[in-house]
Amino acid sequence: MRIVFIVLWAFLVLTATSCRSKKVIAENFTAKPLSVENVVKNYQQNNFDQNTIKAKINVDYQDTKTAQSFVANLRMEKDKTIWITGTVLGIPLVKALITPEKVSYYEKINETYFEGDFTVLSDWLGVELDFDKIQNLLLGQAISSLDNKNYEVSIDENAHLLKHHTNQQLISFLFWINPQHFKLDKQLIIQPYKNKYLSVVYKNYYFINKEYFPNKMIIEAVESDHLTKIKLDFKLVEFNEPLTFPFEIPNGYKLIQLN
């Protein structure tokens, strides 16, 4: 069940408009020193601003025990709903519905379902999560607000690196912001005293109808010696299409608890 839930989290993605006009952005800008205020201002001006997303995603999942690949279909209404189906060989096996209030999913192989809040994901990642934070993370935006924090800024890997450490450095947040479009190249959340970290790398961005959004992502979550790695490759992306979100847990399925 942990695999299903982690994959579910990995699906919570994206952004888009019409794939007819999309192109992958070439990286040809050089980062020049800027103040924290200017970096944050440019970042906020380029936050994602579309209403709905429809996409197909090729997913490669790997942990210390399992490796599998499958296709996910995503429908999303920004700030409101994320709907996902996971398929293998064209056969739907998992369906999920995520709202700001709760997470629900069911899977057909074992005929089980789950309904609950974001506590399981928060415990797994070592970072308190809610719908907005997960949405931001997967849109190429920072999981932690860049407002009202004492950030350090520097140039690293040809990006504007913002660092923030919580009290006693219990958690550290690092954001590499691209100097061309001011979306994230990478974000890293470290919890050293628990030997946990979460890394999200945004390999490329599409440019669709004046909007930047991730094309390929690599997510790594480490807890002690347990590594989970998820690669996401987004295809057939469309923005602002009329969408429905059909979801009904079949009769007879068994409720499970995730730990």
Image: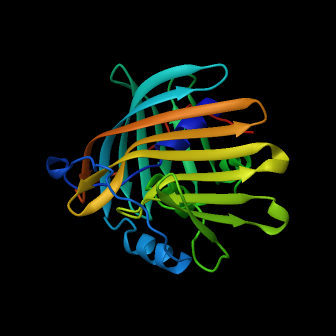
Q: Nearer the viewer, residue 99 or 111?
A: 99
Q: Nearer the viewer, residue 154 or 198?
A: 154
Q: Is residue 234 left or right of residue 108?
A: left
Q: Nearer the viewer, residue 184 or 32?
A: 32
Q: Nearer the viewer, residue 110 or 69?
A: 69
The residue sitting at 39% across, 27% down in the picture is 87
Q: Quadrant of residue 209?
A: bottom left
Look at the picture and state if 150 lies above or below 105. below
Q: Quadrant of the N terminus?
A: top right
The residue sitting at 54% across, 46% down in the picture is 200
Q: Quadrant of the C terminus?
A: top right
Look at the picture and state if 197 lies above or below 128. above
Q: Is residue 87 left or right of residue 192?
A: left
Residue 76 percent location from the top left of the image: 37, 54
The residue sitting at 57% across, 72% down in the picture is 146
Q: Is residue 129 visible?
A: no
Residue 170 percent location from the top left of the image: 81, 59
Number of labels in the image equals: 0
